[in-house]
Amino acid sequence: MIAILRALSWLCARLSLAQVQRAGRVLGWLLGSLLRYRRGEVLSTIQRCFPEKTLAETRAVADGMYRHLGTLLIEALRSGRLSPAALAAEVDFSDLDKAMRLLEEGRGLLVLTAHVGNFELLAMLAAFKGAPLSVLVKELKPKWLNAWWVATRAKFGVKMLPARNSYRACREVLKANGILGFILDQNMKRNRGIFVDYFGAAACTSPGLALLSAQCGAPVLPAFMLRGSDGRHRLHVLDPLKPPAGTDQEAIRQATQAYTTIIEQFVRAHPEQWIWLHRRWRTQPLPAT
């Protein structure tokens, strides 16, 4: 299988941006229209989050998401073969200076992002551009796929920390004035998350970003890598958020809600570039007794 993956990576690396877009559309059509992979669930979730949209508009968002997913797959395969410099030439990184200036404060930096746009490209090219970036990662299955993807990330200079039991390592990154990336739009188990509002419904969310910010005094910088209609990407960086006032439950909840609201704003503006396949609201609060 690894030989097939490398062959596909070699092939995708030879595609132009326009060809990547066309290949992504074909893959998206196969997934969403021919195979109809979880299409009913995707449509239902989009309708709940955007009740003002007509059925035709909802279907258009779903179709766009499947095209986006297909394009992401092609882009991931390209990144395994293309040089970092070649990929960086296709991205507007002018906003990266905001992050680098924040490091001058010497407190480290926490980056808030989500499964919006090409989140992997954000990490890989930020590291290639000189940002001392570490990210929390989960091991992919099967192992051969994980090994290939770890090698691809490492080629760009991304440092990887295990998603679980890495709190001390995260603090060490910040203590060394490094940058730590957080993807905050993943469903958490009830005993590992707190509930905040996301599109009008309770979503179980990791409090880790807010806790690290409060305990280490590191600012939180929202950053998202969005794809334009021409296939090129642009890094969007917002103003940094100050650490929570304390580590008590309400302060952490308010900060986590603020982070989640920022993610929602980006998803509302670019709904076709969020992965609606993710069961974000799967964990729900226990019923009141």
Image (spheres, rainbow, N blue to C red):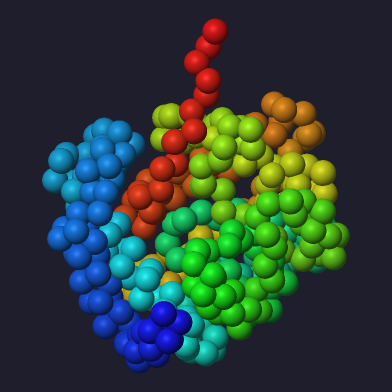
Nearer to the camera, 234 or 161: 161
In which quadrant of the rendered image does the N terminus lie?
bottom left
Q: Where is residue 16, by image quadrant? A: bottom left
Is residue 4 visible in the rendered structure shown here? Answer: yes
Horizontal and vertical percent for residue 70?
Answer: 31, 68
The answer to whether residue 250 is above or below residue 185 is: above
Task: Please tell me which residue lies in front, 61 or 94.
Answer: 61
Residue 9 visible in the shown view? no
Task: Give the x, y percent position of residue 197.
Answer: 50, 31
**What residue lies at 52% left-to-right and 90% top-to-bottom?**
83
Q: Quadrant of the C terminus?
A: top right
Residue 99: quadrant of the picture: bottom right
Residue 107 x/y as whole percent:
82, 58
Q: Report the residue at 51% width, 47% height from top.
A: 185
* Residue 112 x %, y %: 60, 53
Residue sitting farthest toward the top: 289
Image point 20% across, 71% down: which residue? 26
Q: In the picture shown, does residue 280 fall above or below 121?
A: above
Residue at position x 19%, y 64% in the image: 29
| Viewer-closest of 5 and 199 | 5
Relative to 64, is 197 above or below?
above
Query: Going by the image, does 20 lie left or right of 246?
Result: left
Q: Is residue 31 left or right of residue 247?
A: left
